[in-house]
């Protein structure tokens, strides 16, 4: 729908790690055994989100409808009473299908990006705050600070530490030299967790500032610190994903840091009877 592909194998591998591949995902093949559609179900507690994709050449055959029905059935089996499903904002056909099947729009998400046509603006020092690279000893307080900072985000589901450790800290492609901590003496004020490469450049996986430290420019300082490191490593741009209605005003922080919206996704939800 967007006419371009910015995902590679690493991005897809990371994305699929989130989903229930054994019991909540389906692959559709044509008569030649080639994949033409898929559905993945993300389960977080009692929240269920599905992403479905079908080769446009196979539209109109009921594949998407069948995949949605299978996702709904799986949610019922797990005791859930509602299903969320995402789509690209440009996909008017998907919107009509969701609405016809009883879904309603509940949220929009942006992918924002900054291109380094020139060296990025260096981070401005924040009085009393020291930004340092993540160390293994920081793991538990880093995890706790991030969960606390993101607690009010729509759809956020905190991972227990051991699960987060396996999923993030012990991932085969992790690069913790791109994780940074904003320290206020011995307390963590904010954190940023970045991925080595995604969407053809650097990617900010998570950024959070704890409530007592908000409004002091710490989020912007962490972001610019990450930009500087990515630029030093030769990345042409950096992107991130954000809730368009983020309650902490994250989109405004990113805009002030020079980022612009380059893609938009829409989340729909259906209450299951």
Image (tube, rainbow, N blue to C red):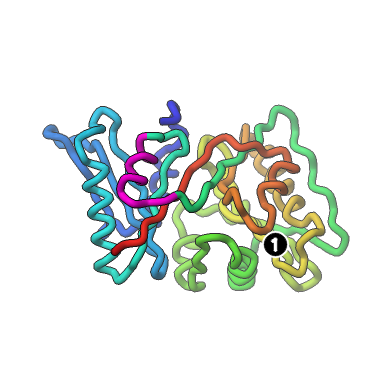
Residue 158 appears in view: yes
Secondary-structure class at tag 1: strand
**Vertical order, 233 against 246 (above or below):** above
x, y percent for residue 90: 45, 33
Q: Is residue 105 left or right of residue 223?
A: left
- Front residue of this view, candidates 65 and 114: 65
Q: Most prominent secondary structure in the magenta stretch? A: helix
- Horizontally, residue 247 falls left or right of residue 3, namely right
Span shown in magenta? 93-104
Q: Is residue 155 above or below residue 245?
A: below
Residue bearing the label numbered 1: 209
Compared with residue 120, is residue 177 higher up or lower down, i.e. above or below? below
| Residue 100 among magenta residues | yes
Position of residue 30 measured from the top left corner of the image (x, y, whole percent): 16, 35
Residue drawn at x 41%, y 43% is 87
Task: Single out the residue that lies furthest toward the right.
Answer: 127
């Amino acid at each position: 729908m967007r006419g371009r592909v910015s995902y590679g194998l690493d991005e897809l591998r990371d994305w699929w790690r989130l989903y229930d591949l054994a019991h909540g995902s389906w692959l559709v093949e044509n008569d030649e055994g080639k994949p033409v559609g898929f559905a993945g179900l993300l389960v977080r507690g009692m929240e269920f989100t599905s992403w479905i994709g079908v080769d446009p050449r196979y539209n109109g055959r009921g594949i998407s409808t069948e995949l949605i029905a299978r996702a709904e059935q799986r949610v019922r089996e797990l005791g859930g009473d509602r299903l969320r499903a995402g789509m690209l904002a440009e996909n008017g056909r998907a919107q009509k299908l969701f609405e016809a099947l009883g879904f309603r729009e509940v949220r929009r998400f942006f992918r924002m990006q900054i291109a380094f046509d020139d060296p990025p603006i260096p981070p401005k020092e924040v009085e009393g705050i020291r930004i340092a690279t993540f160390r293994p000893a920081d793991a538990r307080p880093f995890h706790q600070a991030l969960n606390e900072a993101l607690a009010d985000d729509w759809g956020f589901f905190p991972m227990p530490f051991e699960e987060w450790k396996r999923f993030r800290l012990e991932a085969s492609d992790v690069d913790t030299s791109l994780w940074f901590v904003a320290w206020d003496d011995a307390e963590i004020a904010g954190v940023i967790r970045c991925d080595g490469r995604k969407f053809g450049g650097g990617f900010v996986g998570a950024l959070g500032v704890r409530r007592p430290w908000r409004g002091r420019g710490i989020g912007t300082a962490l972001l610019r610190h990450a930009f500087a490191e990515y630029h030093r490593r030769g990345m042409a741009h950096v992107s991130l994903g954000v809730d368009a209605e983020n309650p902490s005003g994250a989109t405004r922080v990113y805009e002030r840091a020079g980022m612009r919206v380059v893609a938009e996704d829409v989340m729909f939800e259906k209450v299951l009877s």
